[in-house]
């Protein structure tokens, strides 16, 4: 059921992004529906993270769901008051459509999902062996080290972060050169740093660096904080390269601040 909701959201977001100019007003209404279904998708995610004890992601997905609802409401308002419609909402919708079109096939199509996870698992084992760590690939998605086993899942591939940056980079109009630079300082860097992150988690867990809670500490806390810092630095580099993106984000936050401040009326 949730998978169907996700595909409906993605189809609506893509439709909102590609409608011809003469139907621009309807892009807001279709986009609002897409964001609403997207909110439902994220609102259904907390139980998964609660089961694995990843409470940071519980807060994150709930915040994303709320954000989607706010965007949906703002797009409905822009449809009703078309003369004062906010173009930034369409830019954001396009960014989400681009990112979703890249990410969700890997999330929902088995052969792509398996290919990506297997590739990351093999690369992590290659790096571990290159630094003289006795790791082995004991399954297409499992790494064995020092008697311990770690399973690589889709979240371990950094595909979500890569999709987000792809959507942001290609949703704004900029020269080919600056777009290429923004891509180079984000997507490949994220992928490489994620491999390093996986290597750290595997070693920390395999050798029980932090006792019996080594995986939780290494993965849920240290690696997550490190990833957050890295993504912040990468985002800063992208914004320096694409100031148009910074302007779009500033306009979006202005809309959200208006909601939080109670200036928007239903």
Image: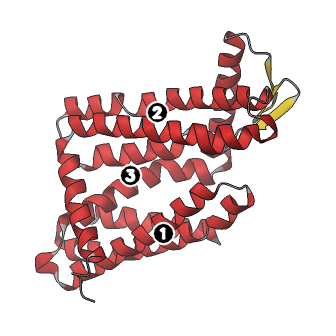
Q: Are marks 3 and 1 in contact (CB under 8 Å)?
A: no
Q: Are marks 2 and 3 in contact (CB under 8 Å)?
A: no
Q: Nearer the viewer, residue 190 or 1?
A: 190
Name the secondary structure under disc 3. helix
Which image quadrant: the C terminus? bottom left
Can residue 227 be seen in the rendering of this structure?
yes
Q: Which residue is mark 3?
A: 98
Q: Residue at x 73, y 55 (%)?
A: 52
Is 127 drawn above or below residue 171 in the view shown? above
The residue carrying pointer 3 sits among few (fewer than 14), some (14 to 19) or many (20 or more) residues within 10 Å by Cα, namely: many
Q: Residue at x 80, y 22 (%)?
A: 136
Q: Residue at x 69, y 30 (%)?
A: 121
Q: What's the colour scheme?
A: secondary structure
Q: Which residue is mark 1?
A: 65
* Cα–Cα gap, marks 1 and 2: 24 Å
Q: Depth-wise, is mark 3 or mark 1 nearer the camera? A: 1
């Amino acid at each position: 059921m949730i998978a169907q909701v996700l595909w409906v959201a993605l189809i609506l977001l893509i439709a909102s992004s590609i409608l011809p100019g003469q139907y621009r007003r309807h892009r807001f209404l279709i986009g609002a529906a897409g964001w609403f279904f997207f909110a439902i998708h994220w609102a259904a995610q907390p139980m998964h993270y609660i089961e694995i004890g990843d409470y940071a992601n519980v807060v994150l997905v709930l915040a994303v769901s709320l954000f989607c609802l706010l965007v949906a409401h703002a797009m409905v308002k822009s449809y009703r008051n078309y003369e004062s419609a906010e173009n930034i909402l369409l830019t954001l919708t396009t960014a989400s459509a681009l990112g979703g079109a890249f990410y969700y096939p890997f999330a929902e199509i088995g052969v792509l999902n398996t290919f990506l996870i297997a590739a990351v698992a093999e690369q992590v084992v290659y790096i571990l062996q290159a630094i003289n760590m006795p790791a082995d690939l004991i399954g297409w998605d499992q790494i064995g080290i020092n008697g311990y086993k770690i399973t690589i899942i889709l979240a371990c591939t950094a595909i979500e972060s890569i999709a987000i940056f792809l959507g942001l980079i290609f949703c704004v109009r900029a020269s080919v050169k600056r777009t290429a630079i923004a891509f180079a300082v984000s997507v490949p860097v994220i992928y490489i740093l994620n491999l390093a992150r996986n290597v750290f988690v595997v070693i920390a867990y395999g050798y029980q660096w932090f006792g019996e809670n080594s995986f939780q500490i290494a993965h849920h806390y240290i690696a997550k904080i490190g990833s957050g810092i890295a993504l912040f630095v990468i985002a800063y580099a992208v914004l320096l390269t694409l100031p148009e993106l910074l302007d779009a984000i500033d306009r979006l936050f202005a809309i959200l601040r208006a909601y939080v401040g109670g200036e928007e009326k239903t």
